[in-house]
Amino acid sequence: MDFLLKPFQYEFFTRAILVGVMSGLLCGVMGVYVTTRRMSYIAHGLSHAILGGAVLTYVLGLNFYVGSGIWGFGAALLIQYLTGRRVYSDAAIGIVTTACFALGVAVISTYRKFSQNFEAALFGNVLGVSPTDLWVVTIVTVMLLGLVFFFYRPLLFWCFDREVAQVQGVPVVAMDTLFALMLATLLVVTLQVLGVTLIISAVVIPASIARLLSNHFGFMMLISGGLGASISFTGIYLSYYFDVASGASVVLLSTLVFAGALVWTNYRRRAKRYDLPLHIDHS
Amino acid sequence: MESLLEIKQLTCGYQTQPVFSNANLTLYPGQLSGLVGSSGSGKTTLIKAMLGLVHPWQGEVWFRGKRLKPGAPPPGVGYVPQVETVDWNFPVTAEEVVMMGRYRAQNFLPWSSRRDRIIAGELLERVGIAHVAHQPIGDLSGGQQQRVFLARALVGNPDIVLLDEPTSGSDLHVQHELLHLLAELSQQGLSVLLSTHDLNSVATHLPWVICFNHGIVCQGQPIDVFTPETLKQTFGADMLVMRQQDRIIISSDATTLLHELKNSLPPALQQNSKSL
C-alpha cells in the first residue's frame, strides 16, 4: 500500500493529479461539443495561437491567464469573422493560428531567455503547477461546468442545427461567442498539463471514445468527462513509476483506451449481426 | 381575412448577386400552398427571408401585423429545412430533436419536464413515428427523419410552417402521406408553405401554388396556374400538361407523361394498361 501511495507524499504530485483530473474532466466535457461540431482543427489551432499570447504576456509582465485568455478569445473571434467573409473555415484557422504561433516564436527567438518555459508550454509541465494554478483551474472548472449545465439546451440545439436553432429563438451569435470564450478559457488553463502540442488529444480522444459507446449527447458528456478525468489520473500516476513525461503518458493511455473501445464496439456490432434472425417475417 | 405573413417588394441576394427581386406574397391562416420552381430559382432564399434568416436588400416581411427584423425570427413560425443540411450522425434521439422545438417554452434545466415529454410524445404519435422516439436519428429512414423535423416544427404550436423540399428523396408513398398530413393540419388552421419541384404531387394535393423563378411568376389554383406557358416561364423548359377532369398531369416528355398517367390509375386498371 505504501508503495502505491508513495507518489502522494509529494505535494507537487498531489497538485498535479488534482489539476490533471479537473483538466481531463473539462476537456472531456467540452470535447463533445468540439467533436460533434467538427471543430477539432479549430481547437488544435487555438492551442497554438494561445502560445503566442502566453509569450507576449510573459514579455509584457502581464498575468498569464488573463493575457493568454484574451489572446485566445480574440483569435477565435477573428477566425469566426474571417469565415463569414468568404474565407474557408480551415483556411481561416490556418491563417490566424499560425500567425499567432509565429509571433510567439519570433518573440522567443528575440529574447532567448525562456527556453525552459517554452518547452513547458509546448509539451506541458503538470508537475510544476503552483497552488495558485490549482485555484485557477478549480475556479475555471466550476465556472465552465456551470455554463455547460445552464446552457445545455441552447448549446445542444446550436451544435446540432444552427439555422433552425435561430428560428426557434436560440441566440446563435451569442452562442458562437460564448463557445469561443469557453474554448479559449479551457485551452489556457489546461495548457500546462499537456502543452500546446498534446492538448488536443485530451479534447478529442475521450469524446471520440464516448461517441463509440453512446448515441446520446448527454450520456456522451458524462462518459467523456469521466474518461478524461480517470485517464488523466492514471496517466499522471503511471508516469511516476515509468519515469516518462506525464503529458505523453496521458496521451498514450487515452489512445490505448480508444483502440480498446474501437475493438470492443466492432466486436459487439458483429455479435449483434450474428444474433439477427436469418429470415424476414413478412407477416 | 387578415393576412398572416406578407412580403412586400422583397429583393434578396448574396454578395453582389441578387437571387430574387420584387417579390410580393401574402399567406393567410389555414392556407396550404406550394412554392414550385427549378433548383437554384431562389425558393430556399425566399423561405429564409420569410423566416428572417436572410437580410433583405430591399422590401419588407410582415408577420402577424409586425415588421420582421432581419436576424430575429419571430415566435409562431416553424421551419423544416432540407434534410441534406443536417449531420445525421449527430448523437441525439428522435424525441430529443422534437424537444428542441420546445426551446422557447422550456426552463434552463438540461433535462426535459414531464409536460414537455408528453407534448413531444403526442406530436410523434400524430406524425406516426412514436415507435422510433428513442432511436438515434441516424438510424431512421428518410421519411421518418422528415417527420421528426415536422414534429419539431409543430411542437412549439406555430401559426405557420415553412418546409424546404420536404418530399425530395422520398418515395411516392411517403410523399403522399406527408402531403395528406399537411392538408389535415391546414384544415385545423395551420398555414403551410412547402417548396418542391415535384409538380405532380403539388397538382394533386395542394390547393394553392406559387410559381417561382428569381421572383414570383404567378400564383393561384393548380388548374389555373399550370399551363405550358407559365411552366416554361417557371422552369425555362417546355412542359406537357394533360388535364383529366379536375386532375392535371405534367411532364417534360410524352413517355414520362404516359407513365405518370398509368401510375395515377386505380390498381385494377393499372393491370389492364400494361401496354401503355
Image (cartoon, rainbow, N blue to C red):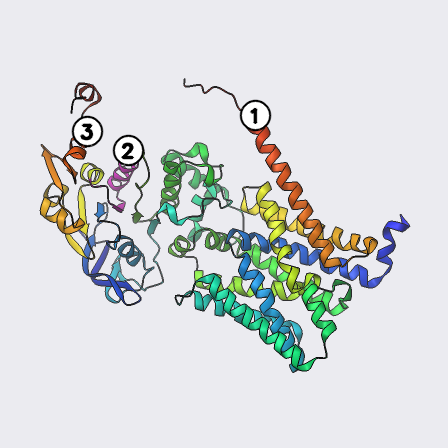
Q: Is residue A88 magenta?
A: no
Image depth: mark 3 or mark 1 in front: 1
Which chain hosts label 2? B
- Expressed as whole percent of the image width and height from the top left, the position of residue B90 reads 49, 46
**What residue sits right under mark 3 in the picture?**
B264
Indicate the quadrant where residue B227 lies. top left
Residue B256 drawn above or below residue A116: above
Q: Is residue B180 magenta?
A: yes
Which chain hosts label 1? A
Element type at mark 2: helix
Question: Which residue is located at x 19 percent, y 23 percent?
Answer: B266
Q: Which amino acid does the dot numbered 2 rest on?
A: Leu
Q: Which amino acid does the dot numbered 3 rest on?
A: Ser
- Expressed as whole percent of the image width and height from the top left, the position of residue A122 reads 68, 66
Element type at mark 1: helix
B196 and B238: which is toward the camera: B238
State which tag comes first along the sequence, 3 or 2. 2
Mark 1 neighbour class, 10 Å CA radius: few under 14, some 14 to 19, many 20 or more: few
A240 and A179: which is toward the camera: A240
Number of disc labels? 3
Instruction: Please state if A73 lies on the left or on the right of A237 as rendered.
Output: left
Instruction: Please state if B92 lies on the left or on the right of A201 as rendered.
Output: left
Image depth: mark 1 or mark 2 in front: 1
Residue at the extreme right:
A2
- Expressed as whole percent of the image width and height from the top left, the position of residue B135 reads 49, 36
* Any part of residue B111 in sight: yes
Q: CA distance from mark 3 to mark 2?
A: 11 Å
Q: What segment carries the magenta color?
A: B175-199
Q: Are marks 3 and 2 in contact (CB under 8 Å)?
A: no
**What residue sits right under mark 1 in the picture?**
A274
Which chain hosts label 3? B
Q: Which mark is residue B172?
A: 2
